[in-house]
C-alpha cells in the first residue's frame, strides 16, 4: 500500500509545511484549501492535497487542480465540476485513475468565482500503472478550495 507524505521539517514548493502525522498525510492545506483523497482496492492512498488556483479556472463552473507538494516527481488531481459532465483525473507517478459517471457520484455543495466545496465517490474504476492495469479501484474525495 502506498501512502504519500513528507517529513515534518520539509518546506514544500507550495509554501505549505507538511504535518508529520503517523499516516504521512499533509496536515496544513494553506490559504487556498484543498482536497482529502482516499483510494482503496488494488492501490491504496490516503492523503490531503493543496489547491493550486494558478492551474485552475472558473467559467460558470470550476476546473480545479490539486497537488501533493511532498511528492518530488509530481502528482496531480484534476477535478472538473461541469454540471453536464463532472469527472476527475489522478496521477501520482505510480498509478493513473480517471473517473466520471456512472461509476462516480459528485456532490457539489457550492461553486462560484471564490471557490468550491463538495465531495465525490467512485467505485470499480480501472487504474493504470507502468506495468499494467489495476482492475478494482475505489476513489473518493472531499474538497474545499478558495482563491
Image: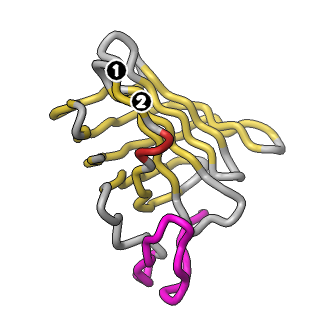
Q: Residue 42 placed where, x, y %?
A: 60, 48
Q: Residue furthest top?
A: 84
Q: Which residue is mark 1?
A: 59
User: Is 18 in front, or is 128?
Assistant: 18
Residue 18 among those drawn in magenta: yes
Q: Main secondary structure of the magenta part?
A: loop
Q: Residue furthest right?
A: 131
Query: Is 126 on the left or on the right of 37, as rendered?
Result: right
Quarter of image, res 17: bottom left
| Residue visible at 17% across and 33% down in the picture | 110
User: Is 145 in front, or is 107?
Assistant: 145
Say if residue 43 shows up in the picture.
yes
Vertical side of 49 occupied by 56: above or below? above
| Residue visible at 51% across and 43% down in the picture | 77
Secondary element at tag 1? loop
Q: Residue 113 placed where, x, y %?
A: 24, 32
Residue 86 among those drawn in magenta: no
Rendered image: mark on residue 70? none
Q: Which residues are magenta?
A: 1-23
Vertical side of 25 occupied by 57: above or below? above
Query: Is 130 on the left or on the right of 105, as rendered?
Result: right
Q: Which residue is mark 2?
A: 63
Q: Residues within 10 Å of mark 2 (few under 14, many from 20)?
A: some
Amino acid at each position: 500500500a502506498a501512502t504519500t507524505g513528507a517529513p515534518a521539517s520539509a518546506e514544500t514548493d507550495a509554501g505549505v509545511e507538511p504535518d508529520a502525522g503517523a499516516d504521512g498525510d499533509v496536515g496544513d492545506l494553506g490559504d487556498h484549501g484543498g482536497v482529502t483523497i482516499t483510494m482503496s482496492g488494488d492501490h491504496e492512498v490516503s492523503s490531503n492535497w493543496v489547491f493550486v488556483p494558478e492551474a485552475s479556472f472558473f467559467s460558470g463552473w470550476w476546473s480545479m487542480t490539486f497537488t501533493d507538494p511532498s511528492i518530488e516527481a509530481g502528482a496531480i488531481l484534476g477535478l472538473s465540476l461541469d454540471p453536464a459532465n463532472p469527472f476527475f483525473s489522478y496521477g501520482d507517478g505510480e498509478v493513473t485513475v480517471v473517473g466520471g459517471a456512472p461509476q462516480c457520484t459528485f456532490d457539489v455543495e457550492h461553486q462560484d468565482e471564490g471557490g468550491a466545496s463538495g465531495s465525490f465517490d467512485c467505485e470499480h474504476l480501472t487504474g493504470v500503472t507502468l506495468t499494467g492495469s489495476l482492475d478494482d479501484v475505489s476513489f473518493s474525495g472531499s474538497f474545499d478550495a478558495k482563491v
